[in-house]
Amino acid sequence: MKKLLLFLVVFAAVLSCGKSEDKKDAGAGKSANSGDKIKIELVSKGYQHEFWRSVEAGAKKAGEELGVEVNFIGPEKETEIGKQVGMVENAINKKVSALGIAALDPDALAVVAKKAMDAKIPVVTFDSNVKGDITSSFIATDNKVAGAMAGEQLAKLINGKGKVAIVSHNPGTTTAIEREAGFREALAKYPDIKILNTQFSDGDKSKALAITLDIINANPDIAGIYGTNEPSIFGIAKGVEEKGLTGKVVLVGIDSSEDLAKFLEKGVISGLVIQDPYNMGYQTVQQLYKLSKGEKVEKRIDTGAILVTKENINNPDITKKMFPFGRK
């Protein structure tokens, strides 16, 4: 059944690849390599969250320094696998110089990544890999390590006992799988911690809020909640604050934003494991540029993760990573 669904997703995307997929994907169908300028396409999982805007900024900065054109696109929602597949198909048809993919689904995107490579287009993955690790390079956070960092922080703050909930983002994506795995492995050392069944927000703040309210209502003795990405932990924090449980339920999460920083400073959130999305975008374009020139690249680039708390949020190095554009 899964193979049939995968075939239908890819087939539908192929049929639609000639249509306009997204208002940000301007110029689809034209030859991207008319002229000598190197043209790099990055197909992200989305662009609506601050994380992706930081990735795009880093990518554009690298493009500016290297003198190459960088086009950064993504579906409106992080559940639109078929749409993302279609965007990759469009990039192949445009004959871009090099292609970066942050895979919404490791299976579906592996099919079109291989198609791009068969068309002699260099491909790397960033943030989320494709199945089989088939691309030239993978640029991302070590998500298991990040999940473990969040788990250790939560376990410490609940004194190694109590009920813990997980609100993840998209089932099936490598980031969600690895961040949950690292978190669970860290908490496995604490026999008095009970982890409830994982629930998924689909990267939607409102859905994460609704899930959190349901968790609290069903488990008034909940000790801690973990959110695996920016919209998930935002919705969790909003729900806990609405319920008047600030300081009573320990919250940890992965990712950063202006709103999450405010929740951290108010004590609603007790720890954020932040990534370096700006560097992720920057390194992705750097590797694609090298590949377009026939140069070798590193197979795996870990862009790092840091635990941020109320106590260290004003550290200049941390502030720079959290707010590459400066605080509002």
Image (spheres, rainbow, N blue to C red):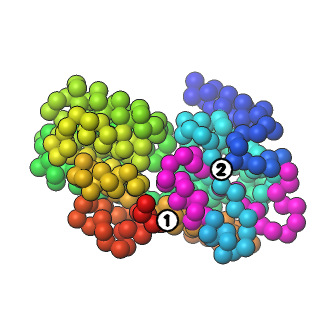
In the displayed structure image, the side of residue 276 where residue 165 appears, left or right: left
Is residue 51 rendered to the left or right of residue 13? Answer: left
Label 1 packing within 10 angstroms: few (<14), some (14-19), many (20+): few
For the N terminus, which image quadrant?
top right
Which type of secondary structure does the marked residue at label 1 adopt? Answer: loop
What is the number of the mark on residue 73?
2
Task: For residue 105, say whether it is visible.
Answer: no
Q: Position of residue 122 (x, y in %)?
A: 71, 60
Residue 97's spot in the image, x, y percent? 77, 61
- For marks 2 and 1, the one nearer the N-term is 2
Residue appearing at x 76%, y 45% in the figure: 90
Amino acid, disc 2: Ile
Amino acid, disc 1 = Phe
Location of the C terminus (image quadrant): bottom left
Q: Let me know if residue 277 appears in the view.
A: yes
Q: Residue shown at 49%/53% (left/top)?
A: 50
Along the horizontal axis of the image, is 87 left or right of 255?
right
Q: Quadrant of residue 137?
A: bottom right
The magenta segment: 30-59
- In the picture of the structure, the residue carrying the numbered disc 1 is 325
The residue closer to the viewer here, 281 or 89, is: 281
Which residue is nearer to you in this view: 153 or 55?
55
